[in-house]
């Protein structure tokens, strides 16, 4: 599910010129910070009482950038495990963890 979507999103990003250089550590770090900037935009949409649809759009941007980066890192060899598999494993692990994973917040 995520792997197929990531492949489509990444292909579009490559076609539009967003991957115009090798995926080295600096480029990957920049892409990670772009995800952070989308999270900040979502926070600002909430803080400023913007339309609920705008908040949904920001979440879409977060997901798109995250899946694009995952696919690019997979292609460059930084990632070797399927995201579908990783999410399934993590969800199963989280089911057995204590409330709030044992921390206060």
Image (cartoon, grey):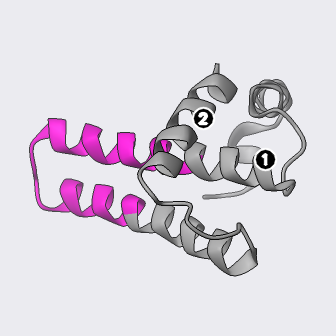
Q: Quadrant of the C terminus?
A: bottom right
Q: Secondary structure at mark 2?
A: helix
| Main SS category, magenta section | helix
Q: Residue at x 47, y 67 (%)?
A: 34
> Would you identify the image quadrant in which residue 73 lies?
bottom right
Please determine whether, in this image, residue 101 is positioned above or below residue 17.
above
Magenta residues span: 38-66
Q: Secondary structure at mark 1?
A: helix
For label 2, count other residues whose C-alpha is less than 10 Å away and answer few (under 14), some (14-19) or many (20+): many
Front-lying residue, 74 or 46 = 74
For label 1, count other residues whose C-alpha is less than 10 Å away and answer few (under 14), some (14-19) or many (20+): some
Magenta stretch containing residue 20, yes or no?
no
Q: Is residue 50 left or right of residue 15?
A: left
Q: Quadrant of the N terminus?
A: top right
Measured from the top left, where is residue 29 in percent x and y? 64, 74
Measured from the top left, where is residue 71 in percent x and y? 68, 44
Q: Residue at x 62, y 53 (%)?
A: 69
Magenta stretch containing residue 59, yes or no?
yes
Q: Is there a contact, CB below 8 Å, between mark 2 and mark 1?
A: yes
Q: Is residue 7 left or right of residue 85?
A: left
> Which one is earlier in the sequence, the residue at label 2 or at label 1?
2
Residue carrying label 1 = 74
Front-lying residue, 27 or 97 = 27
Q: Residue at x 31, y 48 (%)?
A: 58
Residue carrying label 2 = 6
């Amino acid at each position: 599910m995520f792997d197929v979507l990531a492949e489509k999103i990444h292909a579009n990003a490559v076609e539009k010129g967003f991957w115009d250089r090798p995926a080295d550590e600096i480029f990957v770090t920049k892409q990670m910070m772009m995800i952070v900037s989308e999270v900040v935009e979502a926070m600002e949409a909430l803080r400023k009482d913007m339309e609920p649809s705008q908040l949904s759009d920001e979440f879409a941007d977060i997901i798109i950038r995250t899946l694009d980066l995952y696919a690019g890192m997979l292609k460059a060899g930084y990632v070797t495990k399927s995201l579908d598999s990783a999410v399934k494993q993590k969800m199963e692990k989280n089911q057995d963890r204590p409330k709030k994973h044992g921390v206060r917040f």
